[in-house]
Image (cartoon, rainbow, N blue to C red):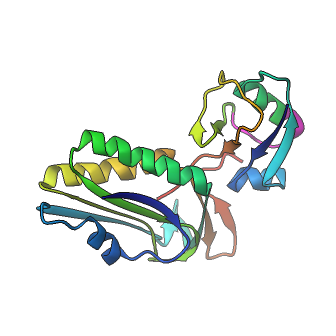
Amino acid sequence: MMRAAIVSRPLDAALLLAEVAGDAHGATTLFVGTVRNTNGGRAVSGIEYSAYDSMATVELQRILDEAASRFTDVSIVVEHRVGTLRLQEASVIIATAHAHRAPALDAQRYVVEELKKRVPVWKREHYTDGTREWVGATS
Amino acid sequence: MRLQVLLFASYADAFGATEIVLDLPDGATVGELVTAVRARAPHTALPPHPLVAVNHAYASSGVVLSTGDEVALIPPVAGG
């Protein structure tokens, strides 16, 4: 099972875990990225995520293809949410499963690190003082 | 040739648009496209080498563009 998607609904970790489940798997991992209440010392009230949806889906799929060639027989499902999220809401969930723990853990780490470097998703933080700002923007 | 360039996030804000249309010579490269984008809005702060995607893949400055390509300027990504 390999699937990647950009979605605009709340993420459900249990569904992703069920998708990667299999009799041959002895190890399953779950990564949940959530909205936290501070960044760079500023109090955050929420994050607005947007994406270049079509390319983001393709780039996520490329990352899964790379993971499949590095970690033979791994199963991975990843969903990234877009829209305005409140504190503690999940922005990204990655579920991986494998016969053994090392490839399951390594594949999860590979996907999240590559996602953060390459997938065209952006976030605008909303601060408790009413201001908002694109994260990582140069202007 | 006429190309639409998609803009997102901070770039869309800076240009006040989610896409711009450029007229470029046939055989123009990604690097030439970036120069044309800068000329269109020199007051906007694009980084020295903004990321460009052509048909859903990152493209280096030497890549030659063709009519019908889907071109996008990609601001610094911040997913996760």
Q: Which residues are magenta?
A: B38-47
Tell me the quarter of the picture where residue A75 sits: bottom left
Percent of width and height locating residue B20: 83, 46
Side of A1 relative to A41 (left or right): left
The residue depicted at 43 percent of the width and 44 percent of the height is A62
The residue depicted at 63 percent of the width and 71 percent of the height is A126
Side of B74 relative to A78 (left or right): right
- Residue A109 versus residue B51 in the image, above or below: below
- Residue A17 versus residue A4 in the image, above or below: below
Between A121 and B70, the one nearer to me in the picture: B70
Q: Main secondary structure of the magenta part?
A: loop
Q: Quadrant of the N terminus of chain B?
A: top right
Between A32 and B66, the one nearer to me in the picture: B66
Q: Is residue B45 magenta?
A: yes
Q: Is residue A92 magenta?
A: no
The reply to whether residue B34 is visible in this rendering is yes
Total numbered badges shown on the rendered structure:
0
Side of A10 relative to B62 (left or right): left
Percent of width and height locating residue B58: 58, 36
Between B13 and A14, the one nearer to me in the picture: A14
The reply to whether residue B42 is visible in this rendering is no
Percent of width and height locating residue A111: 36, 50
- Residue B36 versus residue B8 in the image, above or below: above
Tell me the quarter of the picture where residue B30 sits: top right
Percent of width and height locating residue A86: 53, 78
